[in-house]
Image: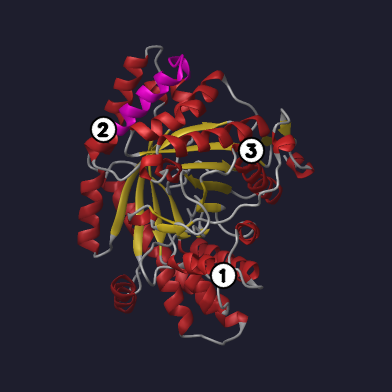
Amino acid sequence: MINISEVNETNKMIEKENLDVRTITMGVSLLDCIDESTDKTCDKIYNKIVSCAVNLVETGNKIGAEFGIPIVNKRVSVTPIATVGGACARSTDDFVRIAKSLDKAAETIGVNFIGGYSAIVSKGSTKADELLMNSIPEALAETDYICSSVNVGSTKTGINMDAVRLMGDVIKKTAERTADRDSIGCAKLVVLCNAPDDNPFMAGAFHGVSEPDTVINVGVSGPGVVKYALEAVRGESFKVLCDTIKKTAFKITRVGQLVAQEAAKRLDSEFGIIDLSLAPTPAIGDSVADILKEIGLEHPGAPGTTAALALLNDQVKKGGVMASSYVGGLSGAFIPVSEDQGMIDAVEVGALTIEKLEAMTCVCSVGLDMIAVPGDVSAETIAGIIADESAIGMVNQKTTAVRLIPVCGKTVGDNVEFGGLLGHAPIMPVNNFKCDDFVNRTGRIPAPIHSFKN
């Protein structure tokens, strides 16, 4: 039972420490929308999403008001569109038409984003996969709500380097197609290794083919709550530090569990998972970087950063799994640059580089996230960065991702403003030495030997 002291404690977290339910995401299966006609596929997709999620935003708002818990975003994720469109799409234009139907459905139901304009190509690509990947620049330029993801590797299959090389080109083209908006299309595009089927966070959310027809996944976030709790134990031992993080994560997850169960019941959907991810925002006091500083670092990037982040990530997960039997998605600490003012500050003073961020991704929830780089960085260099990050995920059996934004017309020393939750970012330098001969090899990097654990 939740007692009155816990209620009061939760109210304080919400009012003063930036606790929120970052997203309620409804996953919707579109497998029953597959048709040989693109027109019919588009109509079925629109009708299925609207019929399933028409009350999602209203329900989220009502639960937030009744429980006094801010629910920031309401989103939808769908079956990877490369799978859904495979029977009808004969060109990239066909996939762009499907993207516009998704966008229209998102606008109709009033959600912030719709994820699942995706392809799963960790071992190889079908014709439909290739068409979808090549359609991404146009799809993201022509829509407002679409988020796109491509899974290029896994621990079991290795890394599809043909897809990695292609995604380097796709990211460059997406930047160019949205150059008039500071290449913002790339902020809605992520390349993953070991992508989970039940992630509620954008841009990597999609509805896995093993999921039920509809499901509610909730992402809870509270970097400010964790930082506030750690202020009370400043200078204490690692045992006290770890216990404090675990207890705080437990309380945060209980809030998410309450919201998720209620949302699933009211929307006549299954309850999926709670994703306890410390996902920062540009708001002051809502920063993972500030937690790392409270643990004892002058700035993220200082010696000890990777160890501190590993500690934080592990204790968050341990606390979360004690509060809910269904913790999933990503769950841990996010380290996006543009969305975290403390990370931005660390970049600007020279403490944090892309190379250090890459090391940190070995122990955080995702990877190189929301990093703005010079617009003239080559597609091959981007592919090399994707390959590096995928290798970390493949070998360590974890999810990793790359969301780079090569901002057209910008260079190191410039800043770019994305607005809202996407924040702003300094343009970070990228290693200028070439990897072209490596990424232009065809085929895939084999899975490591522990792929035989089945």
- What kind of residue is marked 2? Val
- Helix, strand or loop for the magenta stretch, by majority: helix
Q: CA distance from mark 3 to mark 2?
A: 40 Å
| SS for dot 1 | loop
Q: Is residue 72 left or right of residue 286?
A: left
Q: Which residue is mark 3?
A: 380
| SS for dot 2 | helix
- Residue 249 locus on image (x, y percent): 47, 68
Q: Which residue is mark 2?
A: 50
Q: CA distance from mark 3 to mark 1?
A: 28 Å
- What kind of residue is marked 3? Glu
Residue 448 can be seen, yes or no: yes
Residue ID at (56%, 82%)? 240
Q: Nearer the viewer, residue 384 or 280?
A: 384
- Tag 2: Cα neighbours inside 10 Å, few (<14), some, or many (≥20)? some
Q: Is residue 445 left or right of residue 405?
A: right
- Kindly identify which numbered label has been placed on residue 300: 1
Mark positioned earlier in the residue sequence (2 or 1)? 2
Residue ID at (62%, 39%)? 383
Residue ID at (46%, 14%)? 90
Does residue 100 belong to the magenta stretch? yes
Q: Are marks 3 and 1 in contact (CB under 8 Å)?
A: no
Is residue 412 depicted above or below 164 in this figure? below
Residue 288 can be seen, yes or no: no
Residue range (magenta) = 86-104
- What kind of residue is marked 1? Pro
